[in-house]
Amino acid sequence: MTQPLIIAVPKGRILDEALPVLRAVGIEPEAAFSDDGSRALRFATSDPAIDLIRVRAFDVATFVAHGAAQLGIVGSDVLMEFDYSELYAPVDLGIGHCRLSIAEPADLAATDDPRGWSHVRVATKYPGATRRHFEARGVQAECVKLNGAMELAPKLGLAPRIVDLVSSGRTLRENGLVEVEVIAEVSSRLIVNRAAFKTNPRVVPLIDAFRRVVSESRAA
């Protein structure tokens, strides 16, 4: 019996935006997929040839890169952080828009000029992308790796600045921080395992279906 294709989808905000895209492609997940209280990780869909797994955003790229899932949906921030040669990102889905930015306390920003930085200490979930950004500017970056609660770092003296995803900026404002520089604009991409792309005949038609849905959405 042919094994179903597996599509890895991240938990959280992107999941809500990805569901209409999946449905437009003809993939309707079982009801438990949208249940935040469900502890299940793998889900059937309306297409018996396709299953979904729901994992952390950073793990989506790992599952697809290693072939445990053939396709996935993930933010371009994750692709920036992990340079997986095994991944192909053929479609910008036009969802999950935000930006990867540098932020610092408002009182520091009032007198600070990022153009004069030569050395920075930042707390971030993205040390790889952060270092590459600063290296390109000739700035030495000392990165403190955090997986969450980034906004606490300046308050508690861990690092005077942070690099994190910003959407509305509300969380920054509520913690007395301001955005001082944008590293990259971020959106969600359809990613594909390169080996599956070359060898699995079901993958390319599915990519084409996603591409068609995105194109129609932009034309509407």
Image: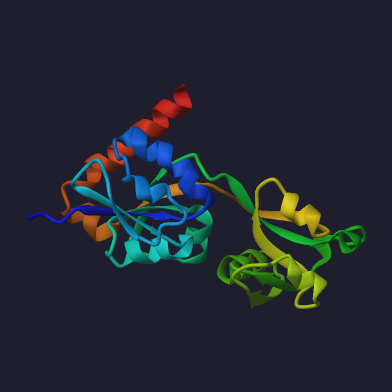
* Left-right relation of 10 to 179: left
- Percent across and percent down for residue 22 are 36, 40
- Percent across and percent down for residue 75 are 49, 53
Residue at 41 percent of width and 41 percent of height: 19
- The answer to whether 141 is drawn above or below residue 167 in the figure is below
The one of 3 and 214 positioned closer to us in this rendering:
3
| Residue sitting farthest toward the left | 1
* Left-right relation of 22 to 140: left
Residue at 75 percent of width and 69 percent of height: 152
- Percent across and percent down for residue 217 are 44, 28
| Residue sitting farthest toward the top | 220
Residue 119 visible (yes or no): no
The one of 27 and 72 positioned closer to us in this rendering:
27
Query: The N terminus appears in which quarter of the rendering?
Result: bottom left
Residue at 23 percent of width and 40 percent of height: 205
| Residue sitting farthest toward the front | 37
Residue at 27 percent of width and 64 percent of height: 67
Residue 175 visible (yes or no): yes
